[in-house]
Amino acid sequence: MDHEARVKTAIEQGGITSVVVIDDAFDPPRVGDEDAGPLLDLLTRDEHESARKRSKLSADEIAAAVVALQNTEYSDEAVNVIVSKLYSKYVEKFDEQFDPSGRFGVLKGSNLSFVRPLLKLLSKCASLKIVRIGSNDAAVELTAVEAQVVFIDYYLDRAFDQTSDPDGQQGSAARAASIRMLASVLGAQPGTGPSVMLMSSHAVGDRAQDFRKEVRGGNNPIFASRFQFMAKEDLTEEQDGSIEIAPNAADALLDIAQRHAFAGAIEDGLTHWKKGVDSAVGDVWKTITELELKDFAYLSRFRLAEEGQPLSSYLEWFFGEVLVDAIARKVAWDVPSWSVLDNAAKKGSPGSQIEGAFDGPTGTVAALYYRVRVDERPERQNKDMRVGDIYLSPNTREVVAVVTPECDLVLRRNGKRAAPRLTVVGGTLQALSGPDTSVSDFIMRGNELLNVVWNTKDVRTIEFSSIGAEGGYKLLGTLRPLYAYELQRRVLNELGRVGLAVAPAMAINAKASAVVRGKSGPVKLAFGNEADASCAVVPKRGGTDKPRVIYRRSFVNRLLEKLSEAQDEVSDEARPELTDLLRPKKQIEFLEKLCRSGQQDGEAAGGVLTTLSPERTGSKAPWCQILIEFKDESAEGVAMEEDVFAESRAALGNGSLLLSGAKVADEA
C-alpha cells in the first residue's frame, strides 16, 4: 500500500499548515582542518556566488570568515555565522550547492541521515511550513510560528549518536534536554497547542508514555490522544525519491494527522470542563464553609435522627448533588470545541476523518463506565444498606440485588429496621464470550468482567443476618440510584419506566482468517499468530440488526498484501474482482470501510464477504471470505490485563468491553 500518498493526503486534509521539527541534526557542524579548504572554496570561488547570495551571506561576514579560516581559527564567531547560514539553507531541501564538498553530510553522519526521510516527506505536502530547530536555538523560533504538530527527538544532544549509551549519564541529560525543549515549545504556543510526535533512532518506544507524562508534569500531561511515537528508521528514502514508510510509522503519522483537529477539540473542551470543575469546587467549598453549626444540627436532629440515616451518608449525597449542579453551571458549554465534538459523526467533520479511531475494545472506558454505574465500596457492608446493593451469594455464580425501598433499610435508634428482612432479585453470572451476549447489565468481580442476567421472577427474601462472613452473602457494590430504581421497577413490573443510560456498545476480540476461490478449490491465506485478535465483534443490540465486525488496521493491511501475493492462485472468475480491489483507490476505500464502520455479518465489501458462519462452498460462494472465529474464553469469565483505576481494579483484556459512549433512552 502507498503509505506515502496516504500520509501526505492526511496532512493536507487535516488542517495542518505548519510543523516544527526539533532535532540536534539541525545544529550546525563544527568544522576542522579537513573542512577549511572546501569551505574557503565555497566562500571565494565564482561558481558558488549563487549559493552565497541565497544563503544571505554579506561581504563583511564572508571576509571575516575567510580570515579566520586562513588563521585556522575554526571556532571563531565569524566562521560559526557562515556555517550556520549555509547549513540552515542546506537542510531545507538538502541542496548540495550549500554543502562544501559534501562535508556537512560527513560531519553530521547518522544524526542527519535518520531525519532526512521525514523532512523529504513533509516537503512534499502542499502549503506546509516546516520550521527546523536545533538543540539550542528554539527560543528564537518559538514566537515566529503557530504549529499544529511538533516532531521532536527523544535524545537532544549533538554529540549523542548511535554509539552512545541511552541509559548512561549522557543519555539521561539528552532526554532531559528534549523534555525541557518540548515544554518550552508547548508553552509558547497559543491555546491547547500542537500535537506531538516523539521520534528516535534508539529503541525507546516503550518509554514514550513516560516521556509524555513528564513534559508538563503529572497534573497537566500532554493528552495521549495528541501524542504518538515513531521510530526514525521506519522511514527510508528510495533512489527514485519516494519515501518508504513502515506500517507502524504510517499508523502513527496517520493518527497524528487525522486526529489533529478532533483531538485538539477534545483537549480544548475538556480543558474548559476542568476549569469549570475547579471553579465549581471552589464555590461549593466556600458555601460549605459559610454553614453554621445550627445548619448541621438541623439536618441531624430533625431529619437524620428521626430517619436513622448517618450524617456522613447524607452529606455524601447532599454535597455531591450540589457539586454536580455547580459544575453544570460553571463549565463553558458554548465554546466552539463542543460543537466539533457534537458533530463528530457527520460526514466531512474532523471526527469522521479518523481512520484508526476504533482499534479494538478499550478497557479504560469500560472501567470508567463501571464507576458511573456501580458504587464499589465493599466496606459499606452492614453499615449503610441501600436499594441496589448487589451481593455475591454463597453460590459464586449467582448474585442478588436489593429491591427493598431504601427508607425501610435505615437502622433506627431502636436498632431495628422497618423491613423485617431483605427483598432481593436473583441473577446469574455469565462470561462475556459470545456474539449473543447482552450488556444491559455487567459487573466486575475481582479481575473478571461478567454479564448479569437478572431473573425478575426470582424474587425472594433473605435475613439481614445472612449478610457477612457467617451468612455467606458478600457485598460487591451498589447500583447508582438511576440503575437501582430501574431494576426495582422491572421487578415490581410497574408500567412506568425510568429513562436510563443504555449500556454502550460491546466488542469481543475475535480471530479472522481468509479464504479465496482458487483454480482448483478454496485457498486459505496464512496469517500466523498475528491474526489472533485481528478484529472485534460488536454484538447485535436487539431488534433486526446484526453483529458487526470491525477490523484492526494491521489485519486489513496484511490481508491486502496476502491477496496481492495470491493473484496467480485465484480462479479466472475471481481475478477481475481481485484486480479491481488492488487498485490504490479501491484499497483505501476497502481499508476505510473495514476499519471505520466495519461489516455486518453476511455483508460484502469489494466482493469480500465477512461471515460468522462456516465457510461457504460451491459455485455461488463469494470469491473471498473472511471467516470470524471467537477466541476460546474461560468459563470463569473474561480476564482483564492491568490496573487502570484502583477503585475499578482492572482494565479489560481479551473479550473486554468497548464503551463508545452512552445514550439516553426513554422506554415507554
Image (cartoon, grey):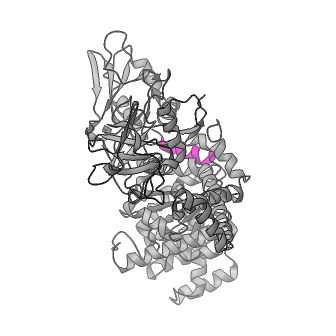
Say whether residue 468 is magenta: no
The spot of residue 410 in percent (x, y) is: 48, 53
The spot of residue 190 in percent (x, y) is: 68, 65
Residue under the point 49% across and 48% down: 408
Residue under the point 67% across and 74% down: 292
The quadrant in which the C terminus is found is top right
Residue under the point 28% across and 49% down: 471
The quadrant in which the N terminus is found is top left
Camera sees residue 55? no
Magenta segment, principal secondary structure? helix
User: Looking at the image, which residue sits at the far top?
Assistant: 619
Of residues 524 and 631, the one drawn nearer to the viewer in this rendering:
631
User: Looking at the image, which residue sits at the far right?
Assistant: 334
Of residues 603 and 526, the one drawn nearer to the viewer in this rendering:
603
Q: Which residues are magenta?
A: 1-18
Say whether residue 466 is left or right of residue 501: left
Against 125, residue 19 (above or below) is: below
* Quadrant housing residue 602: top left
Of residues 639 and 140, the one drawn nearer to the viewer in this rendering:
639
Say whether residue 10 is magenta: yes
